[in-house]
Structures are given as C-alpha cells and as structure tokens.
Image (cartoon, coloured by chain):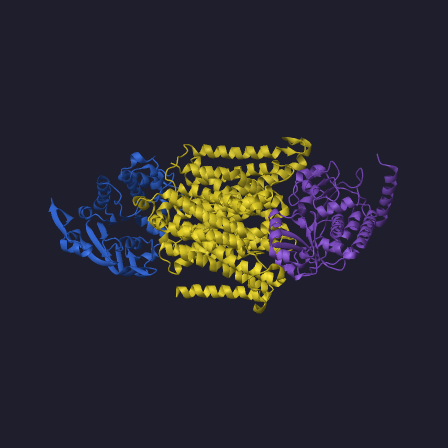
C-alpha cells in the first residue's frame, strides 16, 4: 500500500519526532487527512502538496482558486457555520481553521484536533505571517521539509517578478476595489497584496489608517490626493460602477486616468495564502507590462 | 355615611382644566344621574371617583376612606366601573366574561371556590343572560352585550356601580331593560349606582338623585325632581324646555 | 419667527458645506463659469463636480423625501407614515440588491426602474394589509415596518450569498451622497418640479379626504383613485431618492413634523413647507458629516445619521399623536371561531412536535441523499442533531410565547417580538461586541447580545412605566428603538467591512451552531416561559379588554405590564442569539393559534408556544437539508417559509 520512497521518508520522520519528544502523527494513506474551514489555510496546505480532503464553501473556493482543489474534495458547507455532520463523516485527522472562526472552535475540537492561526489581524501585516505559515503548517503536517521548500520557491518567484517589475518601481501603486462609481475600498499596508507588492520591490501608495487590511469606504475623490500613483483596480467591477465611472468628470480628470496609469486585475482573494499573493503578483506584472 | 366625598377636586390635562374645584357628596343606596353638556366633565368625574384617574388637586374619599389608600383589588371588590365603550372581547364567552369579575377576589393564581361559581351564576341570573352563557360576547346584540358586562360587574360583588353612558347605543326597549336592572338592584338590594346619562327623561324615570356639571363645575346637586324644572334645564343646557308630568313622571321637551 | 428658524437652518447648512468646500479650495481659486473640465485643476473639479452637486443633491433629495412623507401622511391620515415606516425604502433596497446580484444588466440604464418596482411592490403589500383594517395608523405603520424588516432580511441574505458586491451594497444601504458629476442632481430636479406641481393639485382633494372616508364620500370624492395617485407620487419620489443615493431614513417623517410645528396649518402649506424642511434636514445632516470629514474625521454615510435622528424623533412624536390619530379604527376583528375541544388540539400539537422532532432527529440528508441515519453513525450524529433540534424548538417556543404575550398585552394582532425593538438592541449589542473585541468568543458575544437586548428593554420599560401607556404607543416605541439600532448598525457596517461579514452572517440568523449547554439553557427558559404564561393566564385574559377594564377589575396595571414586557423581552433576547433578529415566528405562531380557534388565554398561549416550536422545527429541518451540506441561516429560512403564509393569513382573516 505504501511506496518504498514514502515509507522511508515517514520512517525518518517518525524517528525525528520520537527524538524530538513529540507525538507521532497518525498517518493516513498519504499524510494526515485534512479538513479546511479557512481558505488561507486550504491554499497553504495545497501549496505544501497536502490538499485537504474536505473544504468549506468548495463552490466559492473553485471560483477564484489559484489551483483547483483535487477531484473528490468534499464540501463542508459555509465557512462560518460548517456542516458538522459532513465534517464528522470526513473523519479528518486535523482541522485547519483560523482566528476568524474562533467562535466555532470548541465544536470543531470535538471532532478532531484543530490547527489555527491568527493570520489577518488589524494593523499587523499579513504577508509575513502567511509566509511563515508555510513552515508552521508543514511542521504540523509532519512534512517539515515542505515548508522551506515552498517558501524558497515562492521567494524565487517573487524575485523573478521583481525583475520584471523593476521598470515600474518609479511610482507607488494604489490598490483598491470599486464599490460603486463613487466609493472605493483601498488595500492598506497590512494587506496580503501590499506585502506581495513589497516582495516585488514596489510600493503601496496608501499608508494611512486601515481596518482589517482595508480602508473602506473611501470616497472616490480621495484618489485626487495621489496624482503620481498607478491605480490598480482589483476584482470585478459592478456594472453600475463601470457605467458611472466612464462619464464621471472627476474620474476622468484624475492625472493617473489621463495618463493611462490605470490597471485592472481579475477577481483575487485578499484574505488568502501565499498562492493568492503570487497570483496577484503575476497578474499585476502582466497588467503593468500590458499597459506600459 | 356618604358614598363619595369630594373636596376641592380638580383635574388637569396638559393645557386644560377639566374639573374645577369640585366639592360634592354622593349618598349610597340610590341611583345618581350624572348629567351635563358634552365636554362638561361627566366622564372625567366618573373616572376620578372610580380610581381610574387620580385628581390633580383635592381629595376623594370613598366609603369614608381616601380613595388613594384603597388597593386596586380591594377597591374592585367594592366598586365596579363600566367604560363608555366596552372593548371587543375577542373569542370570549359570556360566562367567561362574567367570571372575570371574580379576579379581584381570586387574583392571578387563586383557585375558583364554590362561592365564586355561585356569584357568577347569581350575576348571570340577575342580568337575565342565562340563555346566552355559551355565546361569544362579540356576537351579541348591543343590549345583550351591555347586560353581560353589567353581569361581570355584579360578579365582582361590588356594592357601587359606576356606569358611563350605558344606554347611549341602545334602542329604547334595551335602554329600559338596562336601567330597570340597575334601578331594581339599588332599590331592592341596597346597591348604589352612579350613571352618566344624556337622556333627561330616562334620568327622571330611573334615577333618585342628580348631579349636573357644566365646564367642570357643579351646577346642580339634588333630588331628581330638582332637575326637571325649566330653570334648572336652562341653567344646565342653555336651552328653553317644556316640562310636563304624566302619571307622576316628569318629562322635558325642547320648546 | 418661523421664517427665522428656517433661515437659521439654511445658514447653518451653508456654513457646514462651506467648511468642507473651503478645505478643498480658497474662494479665489474657485472655477469661473463656464466650466471647462479640460482646463480645470483636480481641486476645482472636486469642488465643481463633487461638493457642489452633493450640496444640491442633498437639498433636492431632502425635498423629495419631505414631500413624499407629507403626501403619505396626508393620504393615510397618519403622522407616522414615511417611506421608511411604510416599507417603501426597504422594498427599493431589496429590488436593487436582488438586481445587482441576479440581473446586473437591468441596472445598466440606472437604478430607478428597479427601485420603483421594488418600492411599489412593498408599498402595495402594506396598503393591501392596511386596507383590511381601514388604514388604521398604528396597524399600517406596523405592517410597513414588518414588510420593511422582511425585505431587509432578504437583502441581507442575498448580500451574504454574494460577497463580490458587498461594498457597493453596504455603501448603498448606508445612503451615501458623494457625487462625481451633476447627473444625480439633474435627475432629481427633473423629477421634483413636476412632483411639486402634482402635489399642489392634489392638496384640495386631500383636504376633503382628511374628513375621513365617510365624510369625503359624502362630499362626492372618489377615494380609491385619489389614494392611488397620491401614493404613487410619494412612492415614485421615494424610489427616486433610493435609486440615486440609497437608504436615507426618516427625513420623510421629520419634515412634515417640522412643518407642522412651524405652523403650517393647512394641507397645502404643509405640502409646500415639508419639502423645504426636508431639504434643510438632509443638508444639515450631510453638511455635518462633510465638515466632520474635512476636519479629519471618518466619512460616514448620511443615511446612518438621519436614521440616528429618526429613532428619537419617532419617540418624540408619540405623545403628540393623540389628537391626530383616530383611535377607534384600531380595533381588531371582532368575530373569531372557537375550537370545541382546545385540549385535544393542544395535545395534537404536542404530539406533532414530538413526532417531528423524532423524525428530523433520525431522518435527513447526507452525501448519499435522503434517508434515515444508519445505526453506526448514531453515536456521532445524535448529540449534534439533538442539540440543534432542541435549541431550534426552544427558540421557536420562546419567540412565539413572547409574541402571544405582546398580542394579548396590546390587543393588536400585528404585535411581534421583532417590533418590540429588543431584537434590534440585541443585534446592536452583537455588532458592538464584534467590533470592539477582536476575535470575541461565544461567551463574549452572548454577553454583548444580551446586554444590547437588555438596554433596549430598559428603554422600553422606562417608556412603559409612564402613566398612561397605550399599547399602540408601546409598539411604536419599540419600533423607534429598533430603527435607532438598525441605523447604528448601518453605520458600523458601512465603515468597516471584514467584520461586517460576521455581523451579516448573524443578522441572517446563524445556523444551529449552538453548544449542548446553550440548547439546554434555551429549553429551560422555554419551559419557564410556558409556566409563566399559564401562571399569568388571568392577567392575559383581562389585558386585551384594555386599561379601563383592567383597572376596574383591580389589576395592578403598571406592574403587570412591566412584568410581561420584561418576560417577553427576555424570551426574545434569548431566542435572538440563536435565530438572529428576524424570523416572524413570534408573529406567525399566535396567528395560527387564533386561526385554529384557540381563543382563551391558556390555550392561546400554550398553542402559540407549541406552534412556535413546530414552525422552528420545520425551519431547522429545512435549513439543514435544503442545500446540504450548506447549513442555511435558521431565522432566514423561517422567514422565507413563513412570511408568504403570514400575509395570506392576515389578508384572509379580516376580509369578512
């Protein structure tokens, strides 16, 4: 049942754990059987090569997934209120959660041990935490080598992208989502995307106060305070906003708009793991190069 | 002993004085008519002496004791009040309505005792609503409904009945029926009743005593005969009226 | 004197606006006419296409709302009518949210047609209900608030289901006046001028109508077309504002009240002065926020501020209502049938509850489809399901029990816990806890929620303690507290948004994520409530007969009312934590009980209690299985299955 290569690795790990005085992780067919309530955790686990067997809000996850979850992944229902019966049926060895779902943690713990981290906390940059999570989760999954490996791969990719983005480092980027044609939501320096921006050697133009990664809602006219920035619109635009912006005198008079320094990115996940940060970086560089 | 003693009673609502410095004594064992023009303060006075409202100034004594010192339930065992408009009693049978009259005696939790059932039965019999016991109150005719409500007052075991225009919505046969009942109870069983009335001739026919108000002041306090004079009526209603008598009963008509 | 007040208001509004304008540009640098966009600086454009149209729009939208409110109040002879209290604004909101999510293309030509359809439908529903009760003011207001609550609940659910547009929806819900060009002002002005003319033309027939339907008929006025035309005009104005700037509550309520207190005696004067007052109110509110933002403060949606003013205003208006509201028309329906054997009915209901509980305990839906639970899973599943089922049934019983108390207390068949404001206060407590405490645990949230509910209750009790409490006013005070709470909630939601998710999720009524201890506590409370209901049966028998009869029978009215309100409030607060603020079980169950012929206090209350449990059991089963594995919000599911029913019931019962 178990391949020779896998066996040796596990035997090694078991020995390592025994030496370190830790409990030996219970192995399923290929590692721990995981169930993820939090999407950032799910992405991280997938990046480590340990895709969860079950995932909350699977339908929504597929929608903007960097990498689609494997066939046969089980849907657990809503993230905030996962279906405990379905979760019990999955019989996970470990449940991946985050501080965001702390309200239901006691109920999850009754089904299986819970691995949780406070990833997105107001005013604390999320990027380093999400990066560190790769190693921490790998450790917990009994695959400690996978963490540094994934981190190194991500850093290498950011470095490559930084090279392509170097030509655009002259101006700071203002990252925002559009609410309607009059209001935006700006990504602050504590956001995941802002961290990715810095990893590419770019700057976030918005340094003011945020709450939970965002400053929201901000009236559109605030953009006038950043005449030098590149405007990066993240995510789909509501149709009314699309219509309203085209004819808005204020929008059309903004220096970045006049100069064509507006870039649009597809729907991305702002509260996610390193894979989403990388996807953002790729899309941004592509958008910058496309308009250059 | 007097039934009610009012000394210097006034009642104010924001911006207006409805009752003005009233001194009055009402005697027990008879039917007292409370009359006056619209807005003269009749219903207000009835609400004051029934304890529904507290006077703004002055004192009201009932049966020799300050009204404010009576506890609500204690008062309800002794004094019953029928509002001008009886509220809809949704889904309630006549018998159940009458049984509510025992609330002052048994409170929220006390068990019904034989004497409670007896009081309810007696009240129903006295008001001639026995055949209506199992009917819904809201399906009755006006006179039947009024009699059921009076039965509830009797079930309270009250010695004093305060009725606010009990006959204003009834045809003349029902009017007679209700006033006959009230009058008979005072005459035969020593109860006291104070009735707000608009119909002078009915007042003259069924009441023993009269209190007339105008603009919250006392205009007349005396035996019913004192009311049925052209002078008194002119004073109360500002209207000239003929007063005549037939078989010992006075009646008045606008001139 | 009155003109002085208006002028002072205008000067103040202008001053506030100027603070914001001057912080953008000194007057010397203001753009000169004619404006040429290509030659203007960004600051000049901000002023000419941002602040100036915003100021004008505030005036115009305020005027439109003021006129809409005055028209509604005139045609319904109801000083509490306005687009917020009649559900008109919420109807527009629901329509726009639904279109944003399901048919975004419909909005390409602007929000107005969609908003108008939604506002018209909601108002039509309220009027249909009101017509059965001869447009009694309190009943119409409550019906409007209920329709509004339902529409907002649905909108919340849709917002939850589709996260992409959350920001735009929340912004819009908050009523935001920010402008980037003159199109909004232009639309509003084009609509307002003909509307004012139409209102002037309607003034005389409306004046005749103020004599009451009989009197108006006697003078040869045809009521139906007049009502329809006036309401249509008011709804169109309200939808217009909704489409341009979103939900701006209570301006329509405040403006006619101000006009009246400034001495607008005749209807025509009121119809003309109310728009002026409305324009000033909205301008002042918006100017205040602009000045605040210019001084470095947060930028809040204007609708949240007007909502904050609206709640207290409603309370202030209540004592002044007496003279203006015809009270006799409030009577409920007089005839109902009575079940011959209420005990058998109750026993049947109890058996149905048990049967349903057992059925849903073992039956359900899993990955392999529908079926009964296999024996090997019992150990894992039974505790989970039993907890959820017990909690749901208890919450239903608690809500239905407090609904029964309130309906008896007020003798108003439209009374419901949602209307009591306790749920509003509880939601506010929840929201404040979520915002204030990072990662608050369940205990913290429970504490915050109860604290919010208790505060609302204390306010209500304070109101109830006042000497002559009429039950109708109690309901309205509850509504006012609820309105206040939802306004603050709107502001919180609009200024933050990661945590808005948590709050939104709860507002829709989170699914049965309750712990066994919590479920047991709820069940204990529900049983205690039932015991209290039976104990208070004689009070509940006498109370519907009104205060006079109650006092005449020696009922200590103030204490009894206070005690029952506290009881209902506690029960509602406890259930709210599980089900969320809106479920309508507390309204539905007593209605069903009455329709079954349970008329006397004990059968009525016990029947409502059982029916509430039954309804919530059904809702819980539906929420669990309808889209497995997604546990749908319990309160929302109850609302969805229950409300259509409820409306049919309300329409039918009084058609006789």
Nearest the eye: C130 or B12: C130
Does residue C293 sit above or below C229 in this rendering? below
Nearest the eye: C404 or A48: A48
Q: Is residue A274 left or right of residue A5?
A: left
Tell me the quarter of the image containing the C terminus of chain C. top left
- The answer, for residue C528, to whether it is visible in the render is no
Q: Is residue C250 left or right of residue C102?
A: left
- The answer, for residue A65, to whether it is visible in the render is yes
Numbered marks: total: 0
The image quadrant that residue A168 belongs to is bottom right
Does residue B107 sit above or below C302 in this rendering? above
Nearest the eye: C198 or C429: C198
For chain A, what colour was chosen? purple
Tell me the quarter of the image containing the N terminus of chain C. bottom left
- How far across and how far down the image is residue B10, in percent? 29, 60
Nearest the eye: A279 or C381: A279
- How far across and how far down the image is residue A35, in percent? 72, 42
- How far across and how far down the image is residue C474, in percent? 43, 51
Q: Which chain is yellow?
A: C
The residue sitting at 56% across, 51% down in the picture is C172
The residue sitting at 16% across, 55% down in the picture is B234
- How far across and how far down the image is residue C587, in percent? 48, 42
For chain B, what colour was chosen? blue
């Amino acid at each position: 049942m178990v391949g020779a290569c896998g066996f040796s690795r596990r035997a090694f790990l078991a020995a390592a754990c025994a030496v370190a005085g830790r409990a030996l992780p219970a192995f399923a067919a290929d590692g721990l059987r995981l169930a993820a309530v939090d999407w950032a955790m799910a992405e991280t686990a997938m990046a480590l090569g340990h895709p969860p067997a079950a995932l909350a809000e699977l339908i929504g996850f597929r929608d903007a997934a960097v990498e689609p979850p494997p066939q046969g992944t089980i849907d657990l229902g809503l993230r905030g209120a996962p279906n405990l019966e379905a979760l019990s049926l999955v019989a996970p060895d470990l449940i991946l959660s985050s501080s965001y779902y702390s309200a239901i943690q006691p109920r999850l713990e009754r089904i299986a041990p819970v691995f949780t981290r406070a990833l997105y906390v107001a005013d604390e940059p999320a990027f380093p935490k999400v990066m560190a999570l790769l190693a921490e989760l790998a450790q917990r999954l009994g695959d400690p080598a996978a963490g540094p490996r994934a981190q190194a791969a991500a850093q290498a990719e950011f470095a490559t992208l930084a090279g392509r983005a170097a030509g655009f480092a002259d101006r700071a980027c203002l990252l925002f989502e559009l609410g309607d044609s009059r209001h935006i939501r700006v990504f602050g320096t504590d956001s995941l995307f802002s961290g990715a921006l810095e990893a590419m050697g770019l700057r976030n133009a918005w340094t003011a106060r945020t709450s939970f990664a965002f400053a929201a809602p901000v009236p559109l006219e605030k953009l006038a305070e950043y005449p030098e920035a590149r405007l990066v619109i993240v995510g789909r635009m509501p149709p009314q906003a699309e219509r309203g912006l085209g004819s808005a005198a204020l929008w059309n008079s903004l220096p970045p708009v006049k100069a064509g320094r507006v870039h649009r990115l597809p729907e991305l996940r702002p509260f996610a793991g390193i894979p989403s940060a990388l996807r953002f970086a790729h899309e941004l560089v592509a958008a910058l190069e496309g308009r250059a | 002993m007097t039934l009610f003693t009012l000394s210097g009673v006034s009642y104010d609502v924001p911006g207006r004085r409805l009752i003005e410095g009233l001194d009055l004594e009402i005697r027990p064992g008879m039917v007292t008519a409370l009359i006056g023009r619209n807005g003269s303060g009749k219903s207000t006075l009835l609400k004051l002496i029934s304890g529904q409202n507290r006077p703004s100034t002055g004192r009201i004594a009932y049966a020799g004791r300050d009204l404010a010192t009576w506890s609500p339930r204690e008062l309800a065992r002794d004094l019953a009040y029928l509002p001008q408009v009886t509220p809809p009693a949704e889904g309630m049978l006549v018998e159940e309505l009458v049984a509510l009259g025992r609330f002052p005696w048994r409170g929220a939790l006390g068990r019904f005792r034989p004497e409670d059932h007896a009081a309810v039965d007696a009240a129903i019999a006295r008001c001639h609503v026995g055949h209506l016991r199992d009917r819904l109150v809201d399906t009755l005719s006006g006179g039947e409904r009024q009699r059921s409500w009076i039965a509830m007052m009797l079930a309270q075991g009250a010695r004093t009945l305060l009725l606010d225009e009990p006959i204003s919505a009834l045809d003349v046969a029902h009017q007679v029926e209700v006033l006959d009942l009230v009058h008979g109870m005072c005459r035969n069983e020593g109860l006291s009743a104070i009735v707000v009335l608009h119909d002078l001739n009915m007042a003259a026919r069924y009441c023993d005593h009269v209190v007339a108000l105008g603009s919250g002041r006392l205009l007349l306090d005396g035996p019913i005969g004192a009311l049925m004079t052209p002078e008194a009526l002119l004073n109360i209603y500002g209207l000239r009226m003929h007063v005549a008598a037939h078989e010992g009963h006075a009646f008045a008509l606008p001139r | 004197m009155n003109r002085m007040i208006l002028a002072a208001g205008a000067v103040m509004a202008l001053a506030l606006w100027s603070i914001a304008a001057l912080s953008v540009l000194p007057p010397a640098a203001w753009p000169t006419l004619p404006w040429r966009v290509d030659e203007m600086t960004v600051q000049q454009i901000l002023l000419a296409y941002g602040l100036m149209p915003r100021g004008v729009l505030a005036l115009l939208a305020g005027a439109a709302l003021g006129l809409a409110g005055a028209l509604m109040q005139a045609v319904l002879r109801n000083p509490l009518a306005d687009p917020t209290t009649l559900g008109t604004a919420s109807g527009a909101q629901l329509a726009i949210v639904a279109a944003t999510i399901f048919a975004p293309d419909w909005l390409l030509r602007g929000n107005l047609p969609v908003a108008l359809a939604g506002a018209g439908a909601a108002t039509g529903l309220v009027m249909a209900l009101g017509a059965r009760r001869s447009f009694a003011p309190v009943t119409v207001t409550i019906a409007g608030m209920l329709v509004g609550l339902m529409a907002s609940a649905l909108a919340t659910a849709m917002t939850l289901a589709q996260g992409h547009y959350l920001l735009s929806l929340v912004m819009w819900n908050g009523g935001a006046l920010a402008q980037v060009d003159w199109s909004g002002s232009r639309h509003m002005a084009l609509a307002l001028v003909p509307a004012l003319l139409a209102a002037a033309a309607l003034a005389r027939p409306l004046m005749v109508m103020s004599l009451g339907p009989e009197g108006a008929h006697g003078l040869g006025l045809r009521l139906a077309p007049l009502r329809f035309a006036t309401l249509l005009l008011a709804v169109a104005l309200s939808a217009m504002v909704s489409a341009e700037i979103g939900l701006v509550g209570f301006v329509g309520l405040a403006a006619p009240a101000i006009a009246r207190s400034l001495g607008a005696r005749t209807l025509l004067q009121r119809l003309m002065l109310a728009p002026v007052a409305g324009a000033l109110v909205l301008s002042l509110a918006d100017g205040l926020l602009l000045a605040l933002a210019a001084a470095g403060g947060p930028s809040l949606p204007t609708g949240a501020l007007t909502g904050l003013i609206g709640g207290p205003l409603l309370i202030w208006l209540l004592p002044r209502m007496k003279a203006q509201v015809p009270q006799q028309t409030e009577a409920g329906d007089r005839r109902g049938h009575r079940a011959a054997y209420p005990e058998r009915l109750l026993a049947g209901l109890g058996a149905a509850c048990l049967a349903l509980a057992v059925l849903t305990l073992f039956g359900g839906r899993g990955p392999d489809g529908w079926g009964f639970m296999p024996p090997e899973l019992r150990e894992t599943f039974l505790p989970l399901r039993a907890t959820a089922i017990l909690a749901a049934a208890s919450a239903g019983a608690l809500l239905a029990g407090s609904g029964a108390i309130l309906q008896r207390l007020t003798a108003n068949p439209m009374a419901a816990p949602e209307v009591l404001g306790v749920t509003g206060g509880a939601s506010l407590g929840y929201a404040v806890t979520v915002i204030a405490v990072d990662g608050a645990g369940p205990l913290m949230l429970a504490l915050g929620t109860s604290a919010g509910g208790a505060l609302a209750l204390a306010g209500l009790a304070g109101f109830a303690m006042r000497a002559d409490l009429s039950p109708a006013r109690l309901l309205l005070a509850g509504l006012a507290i609820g309105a206040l709470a939802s306004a603050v909630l709107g502001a919180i939601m609009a200024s933050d948004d990661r945590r808005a998710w948590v709050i939104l999720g709860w507002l829709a009524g989170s699914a049965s994520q309750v712990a066994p201890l919590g479920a047991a506590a709820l069940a204990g409370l529900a049983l205690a409530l039932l015991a209290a209901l039976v104990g208070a049966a004689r009070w509940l028998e006498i109370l519907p007969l009104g205060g006079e009869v109650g006092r005449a029978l020696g009922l200590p009215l103030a204490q009894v009312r206070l005690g029952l309100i506290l009881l209902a409030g506690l029960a509602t607060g406890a259930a709210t934590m599980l089900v969320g603020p809106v479920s309508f079980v507390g309204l539905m169950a007593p209605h069903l009980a009455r329709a079954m012929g349970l008329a006397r206090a004990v059968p009525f209350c016990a029947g409502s209690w059982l029916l509430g449990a039954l309804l919530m059991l059904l809702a819980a089963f539906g929420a669990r299985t309808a889209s497995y594995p997604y546990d749908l919000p319990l309160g929302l599911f109850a609302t969805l299955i229950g409300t259509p029913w409820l409306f049919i019931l309300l329409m039918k019962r009084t058609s006789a």
